[in-house]
Amino acid sequence: MTDLLTRLAGGVVVSCQAYPGEPMRHPETMAQLAEAALLGGAVGIRAQGLADIELIRRRTSAPLIGLWKDGSAPVFITPTLAHARAVRSAGADIVALDGTRRARPDGRTLTQTLRSLKADGPTVVMADCGSVDDALDAAEAGVDIIGTTLAGYTGERTPTSGPDLELVEQLTAADLGVPIVAEGRYHTPADVVRALQAGAHSVVVGTAITHPTTITSWFVASTKENRTR
């Protein structure tokens, strides 16, 4: 695990995901995005879905954070032990799962999920958290990495238009004993720099790099704003 974390330190992890029904929702497309991101200097990839994880694992050797979005809110990011095991088997180096304190579909606690998962064999787990309390509980449960992925999405913190840098600072100050990975609404290089300066181990960037529909909408919105002036 030490080597894996060293490879991620101070770098950008690119999240290659597409929403259901979108033209780019295909493993081949996501694998190509991953390869392109790595050519650009990404230190790792975050991918969703077993087929995507499997193909990206075959195509690349970079650290791969895998997750499986399934079901409906509130807990849908690798929501059960079975999902976590499947993500690991698909080839993920790091299994990302919901790290909040909310009830899970299979009735297990985060601690129980981790114990069972790690009992199978060495597994690096990233907890996608939404608050300081989530992170404190996740660290106590035994996760290896804490992400700010769900900041602003669980009702515990006020949603921000950009990244929740305050949460990164708070988690760094809490000295939880595990790396803090900044994720969620990181849209510019300046955002990434600020997160690293705040103490983040690495930063996950998704939409701003791999979601052309949203990127296009930003540019289109700017033209509309210009017309109203």
Image: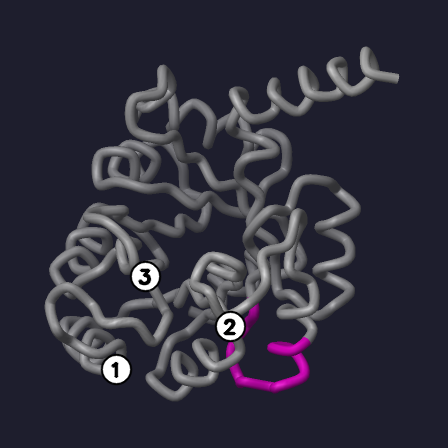
Upstream in sequence: badge 2 or badge 3: 3
Residue range in magenta is 170-180
Magenta stretch: residue 140 in it?
Answer: no
Q: Position of residue 187 (x, y in %)?
A: 67, 40
Nearer the observer, 229 or 69: 229
Nearer the observer, 70 or 30: 70
Image marks 1 and 2: residues in contact by CB distance under 8 Å:
no
Q: Position of residue 66 (x, y in %)?
A: 33, 50
Indicate left or right for 90 with 195 as reference: left
Magenta stretch: residue 179 in it?
Answer: yes
Question: Which residue: 36% across, 69% down?
Answer: 99
How many angstroms separate mark 3 from mark 1 (CA)?
A: 12 Å
Quadrant assignment for the C terminus: top right
Residue kind at label 3, given as amino acid type? Leu
Q: Residue furthest front?
A: 228
The answer to which quarter of the image holds residue 183 is bottom right
Question: Which residue: 26% across, 48% down?
Answer: 68
Element assignment for label 1:
helix
| Residue 141, numbered label | none
Residue kind at label 1, given as amino acid type? Thr
* Label 1 crowd bin: few (<14), some (14–19), many (20+), radius 10 Å: some
Q: Position of residue 184 (x, y in %)?
A: 55, 51
Question: Which residue: 51% across, 27% down?
Answer: 211
* Label 3 crowd bin: few (<14), some (14–19), many (20+), radius 10 Å: many
Nearer the observer, 155 or 30: 155
Residue kind at label 2, given as amino acid type? Ser
| Residue 111, numbered label | 1
Residue picked out by circle 3: 97
Residue picked out by circle 2: 131
Please tell me whether residue 103 is drawn above or below residue 209 in the rendered image.
Answer: below
Indicate left or right for 202 with 111 as reference: right
Image marks 2 and 3: residues in contact by CB distance under 8 Å:
no
